[in-house]
Amino acid sequence: MIAIAIAIAAGAISLAIGLTLYRLAVGPDATDRVLALDTLVIETIALIVLLGIAYGTGMYFEAALLFAMVGFVTTVAFCKFLLRGNVIE
């Protein structure tokens, strides 16, 4: 029963990743592309957590936390670059 739920969730996340990649490629503005990258990070974290549930190990959850921290920092850096033109003052 859980295998079916994992398969459905993986399909839904894959669909969301595909739509986000479309927004990343077609996005009319740079801010839309940064938002799409942030959404892609969140969807990748969801996929990593789903793999952790499927395999029944905690290692994937730690990897998801590390990926979340790196994704947050890169999103902040991109936004600061778009607003001010530089990252380090």
Image (spheres, rainbow, N blue to C red):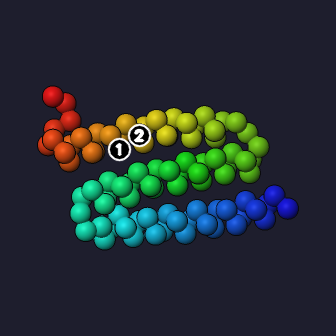
Image coordinates for residue 23, horizontal then vertical, percent: 37, 67
Residue visible at 39% across and 70% down in the picture: 22
Image coordinates for residue 45, horizontal then vertical, percent: 55, 48
Identified by mark 1, the residue type is Thr
Find the distance from the CA under tag 2 to the CA under tag 1.
5 Å
Q: Considering the numbered disc 2 on the image, is that residue within a helix, a strand or a loop?
A: helix
Residue visible at 67% across and 50% down in the picture: 51
Location of residue 29 (image quadrant) = bottom left
Q: Are marks 2 and 1 in contact (CB under 8 Å)?
A: yes
Q: Which residue is mark 1?
A: 75
Image coordinates for residue 74, horizontal then vertical, percent: 35, 41
- Left or right? Give the position of 37 relative to 46: left
Residue reaching furthest to the front: 83
- Left or right? Give the position of 76 relative to 12: left
For label 2, the crowd category at 10 Å Cα-Cα, with few meaning under 14, some 14 to 19 and many 20 or more, is some
Location of residue 8 (image quadrant) = bottom right
Location of residue 40 (image quadrant) = bottom left
For label 1, the crowd category at 10 Å Cα-Cα, with few meaning under 14, some 14 to 19 and many 20 or more, is some
Residue visible at 78% across and 65% down in the picture: 4
- Left or right? Give the position of 42 relative to 25: right
Q: Quadrant of the C terminus?
A: top left
| Marking on residue 72 | 2
Residue visible at 46% across and 69% down in the picture: 19
